[in-house]
Amino acid sequence: MISPKLVSAVTFLYLFCTVVYFTYLAFRAERLGRLATGVAWITLGIQTAAILLRWVESYQMGFGHAPLSNMYESLVFFSWCIALLYLLWERKLKSRVIGAFALPFAFAFNAYASLAPGVSARIDPLIPALQSNWLHAHVITCFLAYASFAISCAVSIVYLVKLKKKGKMEKEGGMAGLFPDLDSLDDLIYRTIVVGFPLLTIGIVTGAAWANYAWGAYWSWDPKETWSLITWFVYAVFLHARITRDWRGKRTAILSLIGFVSVIFTYFGVNYLLSGLHSYAS
Amino acid sequence: MRDFLSSVRLTILLLIVLAVVSIFGTLIPQNATPEEYLRIYKVSTYKILRILGFLDMYHAGWFVFLLALLSLNLMVCSLRRWPSIRKFFSLPEIKLGEGQWKGIAPARRFSLSLSARDALAEIQSILSRTFAKPRVLQEEGLGYLFAEKGKLSRLGFYCIHLSILVILLGAMIGSFYGFRGYVNITEGESADRVFLRSGQQVEPLGFKVRLDQFSVSFYPTGAPREFKSTVTILEGSQKVLTEPIRVNEPLTYKGISLYQSSYGVASVEKAVLDVMERSSRRGFALSLQPGARTEIPGTPHSLVLDRFIPDLQGMGPAFQGRLLEGERPVEDLVILQNHPEFISKMPGRYEFRVREIQPRYYSGLQVNKDPGVWVVWAGCLLMMAGFYMTFFMSHRRIWIRMMEKKEETQVEIAGSSHRNRSEFEKEMDRIGQAVKEAVSSAKKKSSAGGPS
């Protein structure tokens, strides 16, 4: 299998991207920015190739399936989603400043996949419960949602950093001077959640539909299901607070951080700390 | 009280409370046996948790009350907001008062060298093409247009809130008019009733399910590949259909769905054993029917397999049996299929190895009826539509007024959008630009083609 080696290479490339994005922030050189973007797209390309290659390799082993079925595969896919969504936002916003905070997430999850001793890169055949087309819809929508929330979390960090250094920066014009103004950051936190929330909802609904086929119950208050609902509640609070109670800035940034902590617990905590129907995913 | 019930503050409070108590529900095992609880908790803790309903929390009265309160909050909230939403659905004035005109966004102003009448016609056609068909009002030397798009997005949050009520309704229909049960059927046998998951009741199906065959297959790695029950549905003695049930492929008949859930070996039809006499090192293959006595050829002994144990203390399938000399039992035997070394270490006249077991399987089927499930899916679709309307559509309205002055007509464009204001500003710029360009190119054409 070559794909795990590619995934390891991608880990280092994402680390490199992060460094370049930070250097870009520090020196504000347009050329560095273009380099960062270029390397990030190339890394995403290599990661895409690694995922596709793993898909092919699973067929060569005689039990082919999309690489979305265990912890290793989901981590790599999560990292891929974060990088992809970030780069699309970068294009749309024509600003690279979030990169230094968003790409570390892509790096971290990919690194965890390829380095953590408990996460096996072995390709296993699909057990009967996983043999369903709902698998693809469920996993893809959930991880796109998680990735969108990861970016929202990154922007919230930028927001809080900038807020804290607000006074100082204006005088010294340090690297945070490059950050967009607080209002556009606040807006971006909202917009990434507006993308993530419907995706999370589709993820929960496709999971429910799948559970209804596999186990005959669309909702059984399994810890994974319950935690995804808790995450949904947190972001629902965010949306209500922002839209109808006009919460802005620090408070919504913190809500976005809490939301992402809940995402992480839904993803890892439930697999490692609680038992339930998703235990095969660990 | 009514204010509190209809407040978003209550919504936020309820969502936070639901999120926090749900965390407890994932930390405290739900619906476990008293023995399991007493292993984790002290007796007093267990009693308190039981009284507070934390052991079946999501069905406890207070949890259902919280959900009911959230539903009530959604309903009251939606009803109270209706008047402010409704005004967007009655047709607005084409001709705004000066105060209203100032209330909406700074206007774009330019003048066209056309009469008000021609300018109105020109703008009307451009708006119809690029934005939406406008309503028009014309007065002497004056003109007014109004056009709007995406009015539906004002209803998006109604769809989302309604969808939550629909989903909860579907869940209620399921819990009142449906059931969740299970049944184990041995190959060749049939069942016409199932045991309910809640309580000890039995639910008649109204038809019979016969298990024709169960099969399980494995990957070379040893992981299971497929569990399959082939069942026949019978009405009385009439066969209705025969179909396989696999994991992820349930069978639904008359609103009742059958799901592959578990399996096991009910009994053994025939077993083939390798038998070796220790004294002579002679080997035989013996085919046995459990319960029946089978002679070991050329010896005074015979073998009886009394009992098949599907899993003996975690060591896998095993037989309990006796070795007989004539009519007299001489040895008690335990033969493990997966651990032949177990018996070879025991003293005795013979060694046994299980070569093959022809099992008779039973299949565990989950049997559910849930007439509310389609209501739940309808609710989910409605929620998706609601999200689209709320987050990805915006209600945009454009007012245009014009006044003829001498040879020219002065045009003002203003508008409002209830989200993504900056995008809308650009859209208004584009419309203004399109009008100016259309007029100037029309001028050029007429001056080029004119008899100058």
Image (spheres, coloured by chain):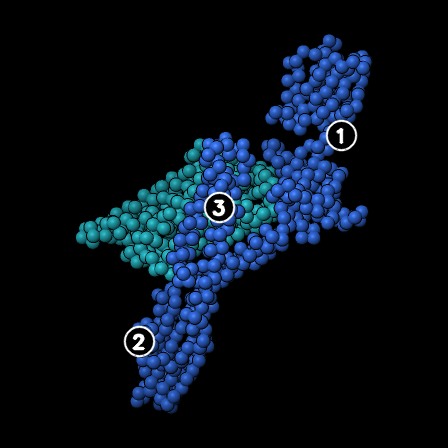
Chain colours: A cyan, B blue
Residue density around tag 3, few if under 14, some if 14–19, many if 20 or more, within 10 Å: many
Left or right of residue B118, residue B184 in this image? right
Per the image, label 1 sits on a secondary structure element best described as strand
**Quadrant holding the N terminus of chain B:** bottom left
- Can you tell which mark lies on residue B380? none
Q: CA distance from mark 3 to mark 2?
A: 50 Å
Which residue is disc 3 drawn over? A226
User: Mark 3 falls within which chain?
Assistant: A
Outermost residue toward the left?
A171
Residue drawn at the location 77% of the way across and 24% of the way down = B291
Which residue is disc 2 drawn over? B102
Q: Position of residue B48 (x, y in %)?
A: 46, 38
Q: Position of residue B213 (x, y in %)?
A: 73, 39
Mark 3 vs mark 1: give the one in front: 3
Left or right of residue A175, residue B221 in this image? right
**Quadrant holding the C terminus of chain B:** bottom left
Residue density around tag 1, few if under 14, some if 14–19, many if 20 or more, within 10 Å: few
Which residue is disc 1 drawn over? B269
Left or right of residue B206, residue B88 in this image? left
Three-letter amino acid code of the residue under disc 1: Glu
Q: Position of residue A33 (x, y in %)?
A: 31, 50
In the picture shown, does residue B157 fall above or below A24? below
Three-letter amino acid code of the residue under disc 2: Lys
User: Mark 1 falls within which chain?
Assistant: B
Question: Is disc 3 in the same subunit as disc 1?
Answer: no
Labels 1 and 2: the sequence-earlier one: 2
